[in-house]
Image (tube, rainbow, N blue to C red):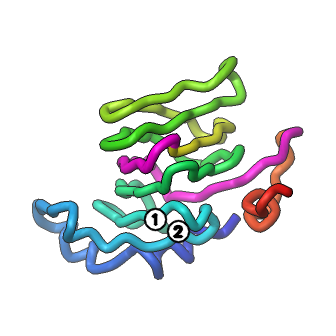
Amino acid sequence: MKTAAAIAGCLFVANVQAQDMGMVRKMQENKFAAVPGMPSCITAAVQSGDPTKGASVLLFKGKAGCMVPWHWHTPVEQVMLVSGSATFEMKDHKGSTTVGPGGYAMMPSKHVHQFKCTSACTGFVSSDTAFDIHYVDAAGKEVPPEAALAKKK
């Protein structure tokens, strides 16, 4: 799915200038925006890098109950929770794991997983190359974001 190009327009706000020098940012200084191709209950702010071109770190916020259904990414994805609680489920693991603040998950490239904020949650996502998201159905076949994110009846 081609969400990477759309992310730039929504998230890449004055971040380039900060790349040539160190930076410190307070939580309230972040500019959170919707992430195209992701559920509307998730917003994010770029902390470093350009997620459309290479390695990056994003700070995300998710509402309680927010689910990112089965998907995979091209980059290696690392997630560290800062507040709240979230559940990770991976296709190659039995069951799910719920983590709280300080909880960590790493998914190798193309590793199918899903994520749910079990309470309102905030965390960091680090990607080692341009960020993308590819949703899959129960059989592991890639599906468009619209189909994956449609409300189940």
Residue 94 sits in quarter: top right
- Relative to 140, residue 12 above or below: below
2 or 1: mark nearer the eye: 1
- Relative to 8, residue 41 above or below: above
The numbered dot on residue 35 is 2
Q: What's the CA distance linking mark 2 and mark 1? A: 6 Å
Residue drawn at x 64%, y 41% is 114
Residue 140 at x, y percent in the picture: 83, 41
Residue 116 at x, y percent in the picture: 57, 43
* Residue type at tag 1: Thr
The numbered dot on residue 103 is none
* Image: magenta residue range: 118-139
* Residue type at tag 2: Val
Q: Which residue is mark 1?
A: 43
Residue 147 at x, y percent in the picture: 82, 62
The quadrant the C terminus occupies is: bottom right
Tags 2 and 1 touching, CB below 8 Å: yes
Residue drawn at x 41%, y 48% is 121
Residue drawn at x 48%, y 56% is 63
Residue 50 sits in quarter: bottom left
